[in-house]
Amino acid sequence: MSESVLTSARYGKDLVRVFRVVRDGEFHQVVEYNVTFLIEGDIETSYTVADNSVVVATDSIKNITYYLAKTSPHILSPERFALHLGTHIVSKYPHIHRAFVTLEKLRWSRIALSANDHPHPHSFTVEVEVNASAGKNKLSAKVTSGITDLLVLKSGGSAFYGYIQDEYTTLPEVDDRILSTSVDLTYTFAPLSLNSPTDTKKLDFTVPEGFALGSIWDANNVATRARNATLDIFALDASASVQATLFKMGQRVIAENAGVESVTYKLPNKHYIPIDMKYIGVDNTTPANAEVFVPVSAPSGLISATISRK
C-alpha cells in the first residue's frame, strides 16, 4: 500500500447543543448554540498506524465546549465565544495547530408585554478558524458571521421587466409584484491576531480595549446593523430586481462596518403566482387587481452575490 499517502486530516465533534442562562439578579439572558468543533494538527499517525496517543477524544472536545459555556465571560457573543474555544484548544495541546468552530445561534426574544415588537425569527451563524501553525505565541484567526432563514415579504414596491425576451421566455413583465425571500447573509471580517493565553490551563481569552466600531470585537453591533440594513433596504427600496436590491444591502453593510471585508447574500425567490380567474369574469392577473395568489415553493429563482470592500 506504499502508493498511497494521507494528505489531509481533520476531526472533532459535531452537533453539540448547548443552552446557557446568564443570571444577573432578576434579569436573565439566554443563549442557545449548535456547535461544530473540529481540529487539525500532528494527528496523521492516528490514521496511518493506529496511534491513539495523538488523539484528543471527540468526547473531550464536547466537554471543552460545555466547560467554556459555563465559565467563559464571552458566552453571549458567538464570535468571541467561538474564538475562545479555538484559542483554548490550540494553546492547550502542543500538537494541535488549527481549530475550526462553527456556531449556529438560535434566536430567542423576550416577550414584548403590551407592545407591538415582533422580531423576525432567524438563526445567527459564526464560522471561526484559529491558526497556531506559525507558533503558539502567534495566533491568528478568520471570522465569518451571518444570519440564515430571515423570511421577509412585501406585497408591492417590486418590479421586474427589461430582461431578455426570446423563444424561451414565458415570464410576463410586471411593474409591481410580491417580493419574498428567505435571506441568507454572511459577512467576513478582516483577519486578526489573537493574544495567546498566559495562564497555566490556557483558559484566558482577552478582548483588546479601545477596539474600532464595526470590527470583530464589535460583532454584536455589527450583527444588528447588518440585520437592520437588510430589512430597511428590502422594505424601502423600489426594487427593479432582486439583484439590484441585494447589491444595495451589501453596500450598506460594508459602509456601516469598517471591519467587514466582504458580504455575501443568497436570496431564493419565494414565488406567489396570481390565480387566473378569467373563467368567472374576474381580473386577478393584472398587477393592480392581483389579490389572490398561490404560493409556489419550487422551482424557484436563487440570486446570490458577494460585495467586497475596495
Image (spheres, helix red, strand yellow):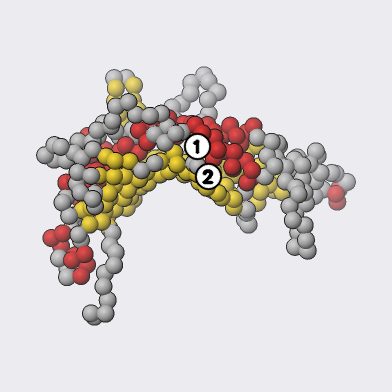
| Residue 126 in sight in this render | no
Q: Quadrant of residue 289?
A: top right
- Residue at 66% x, 48% y is 271
Above/below status of 211 relative to 84:
above
- Amino acid bearing label 2: Ile
- Residue at 32% x, 53% y is 14
- Amino acid bearing label 1: Ile
- Residue at 42% x, 36% y is 259
Q: Is residue 2 left or right of residue 120?
A: left
Quarter of the image with the N terminus in it: bottom left
Q: Is residue 190 left or right of residue 122?
A: left
Q: Which residue is mark 2?
A: 307
Disc 1: CA contacts within 10 A as few (<14), some (14-19) or many (>=20): many
Q: Tell me where residue 84 appears, x and y as whole percent.
A: 26, 40
Badge 1 vs badge 2, beta-carbon distance below 8 Å: yes
Q: Give the number of the disc on residue 254.
A: 1
Q: Tell me where residue 223 appears, x and y as whole percent.
A: 44, 34
